[in-house]
Image (cartoon, rainbow, N blue to C red):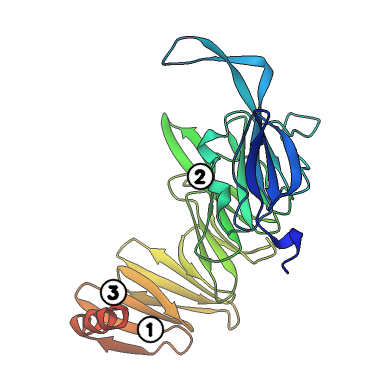
Amino acid sequence: MVAVEAQQLSLFKENRKWGYRVGQAVIITPEYDTAFSFDKTNRIALVANKSQFDKVVNPLTGEEESAFDYFYIDRHNTKLRLLAEHFPDSMFTFPDQQELRFDYQDSSNYFKILFQDKLFLFSKDGKQLSSGYDNIAETKVKGYFITENFSKMEKKMLRIKGLIDSTGLVIAKCKYAEVSINNEDSIAYCCSALVNTFLNDDVYNNKGKLIYSNKKHIVFSSKNIHVLKVYEPNDYFLIENALTHDSYEVDGSGFFYLKSNKALVVQKDTWYILDMLSRKKQKIDKDDYFRHLYQLIEP
């Protein structure tokens, strides 16, 4: 028999209130005016009660109605609390969660709470992992999240980015134009261009320690290899080796990292694979390259 703790809770209604049960066993007594299903991991649900104080106007009828106070609860009916800047006490009541009412329901271990027009990242164990941002998005690299804020600069709205991990550690503060991750070395390299031309591009390890910085644009970085883009007097890449403390130049306009310290470098109509450690180049036919690539991804 499957333990009750492992079974999916289902909604039920009684006396115009919503609760949760497993089979006929009541787990959370009906006390909510509206409620949504628990997520697929069976840990978090979004519920709400009519507010005693706040009112909204129904756009269809024009009548004044009670607004809803939303809560996130665990399967023990404990309300999750959030600590936000400028609020000395933790909050557990959140208005305006309608846009997120389905976002938490997947099988991910993480979800977001909207409060004061900012998103906060939480684990589904109830731990708050971040302060508030305009947006938080999980990256393709498991366990890392891009943070975003909108900033007005010279009458333009810019989107600045940072990086946090799944423990809530801030790897890179939210101040860059772009943040990229080298999953082989657990390295984040961050571009400041368009945000502030006087700031350096930076490289951080997975502990959030700054390990490299340069005024030139960093197009790729590993723990020991840093690739810089130089635009004047002509396009080329400057490749620095932190172990040997030497550097060399490579002509080209496009740089695409592959794996194991090898990269595809594009120089007009000439394409070649560069071994960044040995500096060896292998010229390739781009038509053959795309043909081979298509064969790899063709179903």
Disc 2 is placed on an element classified as strand
Vertical relation: 245 (above or below) 234: below
Question: Percent x, y for residue 3?
Answer: 75, 64
Do the residues under discs 1 and 3 have CB atoms within 8 angstroms? no
Label 1: which secondary element: strand
Residue 232 appears at what percent x and percent y?
33, 61
Name the amino acid type tagged 1: Leu
Foreground residue among 297 and 189: 297
Give the residue drawn at x 27%, y 78%: 298
Residue at 33% x, 76% y: name it: 265
Q: Which quadrant of the rendered structure holds the C terminus?
A: bottom left
Q: Residue 4's image quarter?
A: bottom right
According to the image, label 1 marks what residue?
274
Residue 254 appears left or right of 194: left
The part of the image, by quadrant, that contains residue 14 is: top right
**Which residue is label 2 attached to?**
160
Given the current orientation, which residue lies at the most extreme right position? 89
Per the image, label 3 sits on a secondary structure element best described as strand
Q: Report if residue 35 is visible in the image.
A: yes
Residue 80 visible at all:
no
- Does label 2 or label 1 sit earlier along the sequence? 2
**Residue 128 on image: x %, y %:** 72, 47
Q: Which residue is mark 3?
A: 266
- Looking at the image, is mark 2 or mark 3 earlier in the sequence? 2
| Label 1 environment density (alpha carbons within 10 Å; few <14, some 14–19, many ≥20) | many
Frontmost residue, 8 versus 221: 8
Residue 78 lies in what quarter of the image? Answer: top right
Which amino acid is tagged 2?
Ile
Residue type beneath disc 3: Val
> In whole angstroms, how far apart are the C-alphas of marks 1 and 3?
10 Å
